[in-house]
Image (spheres, rainbow, N blue to C red):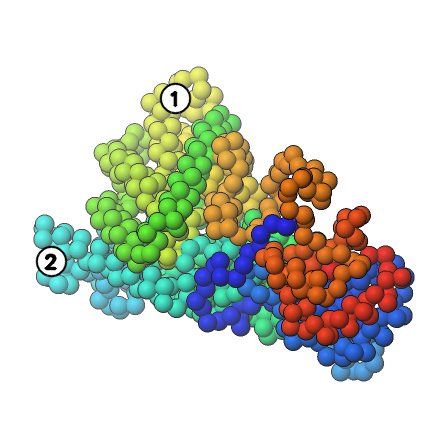
Amino acid sequence: MNNKGFRRGSFQSSTSDEDMVEIAGGALDFSITDDDPPLDREMLGGFSLYNGGGMNGTTQMMDFLEEPLPGVGTYEDFNTIDWVREKSRDRDRHREIASKSKESTWALIHSVSDAFSGWLLMLLIGLLAGSLAGLIDISAHWMTDLKEGLCLSGFWFNHEHCCWNSNETTFEDRDKCPEWESWSQLIIGHGEGAFAYILNYFMYVLWALVFSLLAVLLVRGFAPYACGSGIPEIKTILSGFIIRGYLGKWTLIIKTVTLVLAVSSGLSLGKEGPLVHVACCCGNILCHLFTKYRKNEAKRREVLSAAAAAGVSVAFGAPIGGVLFSLEEVSYYFPLKTLWRSFFAALVAAFTLRSINPFGNSRLVLFYVEFHTPWHLLELVPFILLGIFGGLWGSFFIRSNIAWCRRRKTTKLGKYPVLEVLVVTAITAVLAFPNEYTRMSTSELISELFNDCGLLDFSKLCEYVNDFNSTTGDDLPDRAAGPGVYTAMWQLALALILKVFITIFTFGMKVPSGLFIPSMAVGAIVGRLLGVGMEQLAYYHHDWTIFSGWCSQGADCITPGLYAMVGAAACLGGVTRMTVSLVVIMFELTGGLEYIVPLMAAAMTSKWVADAIGREGIYDAHIRLNGYPFLEAKEEFSHKTLAMDVMRPRRNDPVLTVLTQDSMTVEDVEAIINETTYSGYPVVVSRESQRLVGLSSGEMSSFQLVREPKRNAMWIKALQSETSKCHRLQLVK
């Protein structure tokens, strides 16, 4: 119990919005009633007195403490909240409101409004999170296309929306329209030739560097907590840890702006993880509108759990998956009522984003699939192979990224975040431009890989040798691959190599960076490559035993887009170790209800393989790397030391530092606090019995006994007069 605590100063924070992100309550409620059950009693200064019977004498102890001590009830930065005390305060508050609701009409209205405030808060969170997500989607899409050109009919249109108004656009040349001009056309008047290519290349790299430079400078100058994914810190905060400034107004503003810049720069990152951080910032700020949540840390964390669900909902267009993600991945305390409120917040957020319609297709995401071709049982073998690859890739990525981030923290590399971002951006842009599959945004790449080729698709992935005589219905049969398909295959292979390695160095830089989309892109590329290979194998060897009976000549047997979906789920599961929520998110993301079983098989296989190599997901690994005090419920500990060995140290070992319930003066406690640096002190009955009865926070004890010795002497004296009635005296924070 005498482990060194987290001291102030061990973490750096330069934000100025601590008032918004204190994640701390106000002064304690000192109302005490005789009908309080055990474990519900609160005493001033973090003392809890447990009594099996009534407490008729406790009111006498409060005569000299009519006013609360200043500062009591708040938490210092990088400390942990007291869950028992916070829940006890909330129960007392509910009891008081219920008792007063019968006294007057105004009190009844206050009681009803208090009960309704939680749902109103969820509504506001959903509206704000959905609106910000729509703004981010529209802005990122426009700025991504800005690197390649500009729309003449309206500079505010992105490439796709610009060409919608073109009457001369054909399906084959849908990416070329008179209204959209590349930078070479705008500067030198034409887009053909080597010089035009070099000019477009230069403008692409230049815009990427400008966007990333603005992002890192804004993060560094205004909100250092706006960098990264945010999910590791959100998990830590939801477990009860205090990180002031992490969910404040400046973090929200800078994270929203720089997320657009980072995504538009073309770096191998996504916006999905940071959107969870943005939604939690919205939840934390809106909590200050309601006293019920502003002054209670446990209640506020219920709101943050719901906000995390809303964040995933707008990130993937998956309300149900968002609720499951919050429950499975980030939440530490998730009561049943939080489940319903999380669902409501996710629903409102998704509806708001749908109303904004950022993609112009009446859908929440770009990845919706239009095909519903059935899959065969034998295809589970390649699906499981994709799961194995996902587990291996996830483990490789986690180890490599953690090693690089540790090197960044422990060497001079961490002192130059701006230079690091610019170097990685330059390498990414220079290598990405020549390949059309890395030049486009990662979301567009995934959408292209998920797509099943139709008659009107003219991308390289769909350049098959068409046999229109064998076409029946809406589904095209398996066909021989044409030159365009083979060109696309080696381009995708090069894109895979770039994505695999550049993502390792990108995730963790001082810009907002999510990991969902890059992981899905890696899996989607591998899945598409395997799917095309299986398709050609079935086309040329449909008479093999493995294909006989279900894949005849001229039939649509293999769907490469399905393999891309399964590969994306496998790699995302290998990195994050999500299972149930992952499958539901992928189902809602694509709309492919028929493909639940392949997604489940790949997700479970990737988790088994990854867990066999290392049990930590990427977020848990970053929590451990940053030294956050997160106690993982799923983690198993093996200790060979017995409790008696700790309580009674060996010869020549220092004696365990404890506070005793009896025969300890204020001066004794003050001396212990001044001589040690522990974050907490066990409270025992006496040094002879060593029976544990509670825990006293070192910080709160220091505040009370050093700054208020006289009042605390009176307090301890009053407590001693009640010991004959008490079963246990627990000193808690």
- Residue occupying image coordinates x 58% and y 54%: 5
Give whichever of 509, 208 is nearer the camera: 509
Residue corresponding to mark 2? 190
* Quarter of the rendering occupied by the C terminus: bottom right
Residue 555: image quadrant is: top left
x 42%, y 55%: residue: 228
Q: Is residue 333 visible?
A: yes
Residue 613 in the image: x percent, y percent? 49, 32
Position of 659 with respect to 20 (left or right) is right
Q: Is residue 365 above or below residue 222?
A: above
Q: Mark 1 and mark 2: span between their CA atoms?
A: 49 Å
* Residue at 67%, 69% in the rendered image: 704
Q: Secondary structure at mark 2?
A: loop
Q: Residues within 10 Å of mark 1 (few under 14, many from 20)?
A: many
User: Which is nearer the eye, 157 or 18?
Assistant: 18
x, y percentage for residue 542? 39, 21
Q: Which callout, 1 or 2, points at the residue further toward the start of the chain?
A: 2
Category of crowding for the residue at label 2, using alpha-carbon neighbours closer than 10 angstroms: few (below 14), some (14–19), many (at least 20): some
Q: Which mark is residue 542?
A: 1
Q: Compared with residue 611, is residue 83 higher up or lower down, i.e. above or below?
A: below
Image vertical order of residue 325 relative to residue 571, above or below:
below
Q: Are marks 1 and 2 in contact (CB under 8 Å)?
A: no
